[in-house]
Image (cartoon, rainbow, N blue to C red):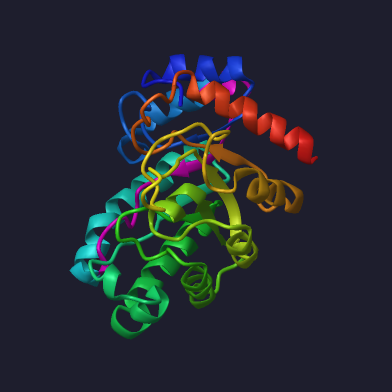
Amino acid sequence: MAGRDFAAALERHTEWGITQLDLKDCIFGKNIAELSDAEATRAAELIAARGMSVYCLSSSIFASDVEVGQAAFHSRHEPALERVLAVARILKPTYIRLISAQTSRRSEVQNSATYLAENHPWVFDVYGEAIDRIFAAGFKTVIENEVENQILVSAREIRDFFAIIKRAERVRFTWDIANSWQSGALPTLAMYQELKPVIGYVHVKGGKCDGRSPALKFATSLRDAEWPVREILSAVIRDGVSPVICLNPPHGSAAPGDDLSNLAERDLKFMRELIDATV
């Protein structure tokens, strides 16, 4: 949101009045699973010196195709989970993010929870084990929906997935609203109401279609986004399901004639106006 130089980005966040951070990459040129203990300690010092705290460590753990099988899936992500837990002990986030896994059969699957239960039931065990390890280390888990062939698309399958995991006190759903749209599930207030029991965190960014298809294509500011921003986020704020709302840069390029300059500041201003109006 504020550039690739970590210290300079923190200064920018200070200027914006942001006190809680969602860390993913660009931390001394690395993502969180690549940080050494010394680098994590230095990051923690820089954050604390500015009166900030870490709300979430956004790992990419489990961003893999389930069809590779349990052994390959586990071996790919086990080292990253171990490293992120070590970093978390230093940076002390509220949440650690796991990513929605993927399926190469997405176009054939009506409900991924049913598909997994019938064909890859080990997926629930792998997520459950990771959630339990994160909880034992003193943190909670969020699982976020992504965009490429991922298993968490429709509200029904998301609810079913969390029902099978059965760890409501340890794990919540991060709803990236524009990612739902990009995955083919147009976000609506009705979708929010269905997801509300499992949501613990919300990510927001702009986006619009090209006028010929309902699919998300162009990046926009939040104010100009074509999903029902005010309607959904006002409900999110009133209901208190996401104590922190994370601003993300939008996907896609600018539509002809659109201006994407100073987008982070503009989106932050919009969100503050919306929160003030809602509260």
264 lies left or right of 237: left
The picture places residue 38, in percent across and down from the top left corner, at: 37, 27
Is 219 included in the stretch rendered in magenta? no
Residue 76 seen in this snapshot? yes
44 lies left or right of 24: right
The picture places residue 62, in percent across and down from the top left corner, at: 33, 57
Outermost residue toward the bottom in this view: 118
19 lies left or right of 182: right
Instruction: Say above or below: 11 vs 26.
Output: above
Residue at the image position 43 percent from the left and 50 percent from the top: 179
Outermost residue toward the front in this view: 212
Instruction: Say above or below: 263 vs 70.
Output: above
The picture places residue 209, in percent across and down from the top left corner, at: 41, 45
Q: Nearer the viewer, residue 68 or 81?
A: 68
- Figure quadrant of residue 250: top left
Q: Which quarter shows the C terminus?
A: top right
Residue at the image position 49 percent from the left and 24 percent from the top: 263
- Figure quadrant of residue 26: top left
The picture places residue 2, in percent across and down from the top left corner, at: 45, 21
Q: Which residues are magenta?
A: 47-66
Residue at the image position 56 percent from the left and 29 percent from the top: 267
* Figure label count: 0
Q: Nearer the viewer, residue 162 or 235?
A: 235
Residue at the image position 45 percent from the left and 28 percent from the top: 41
Q: Nearer the viewer, residue 235 or 144?
A: 235
Residue 45 seen in this snapshot? no
Is 50 included in the stretch rendered in magenta? yes
13 lies left or right of 274: left
Instruction: Say above or below: 181 vs 51.
Output: below
Instruction: Say above or below: 75 vs 121.
Output: above
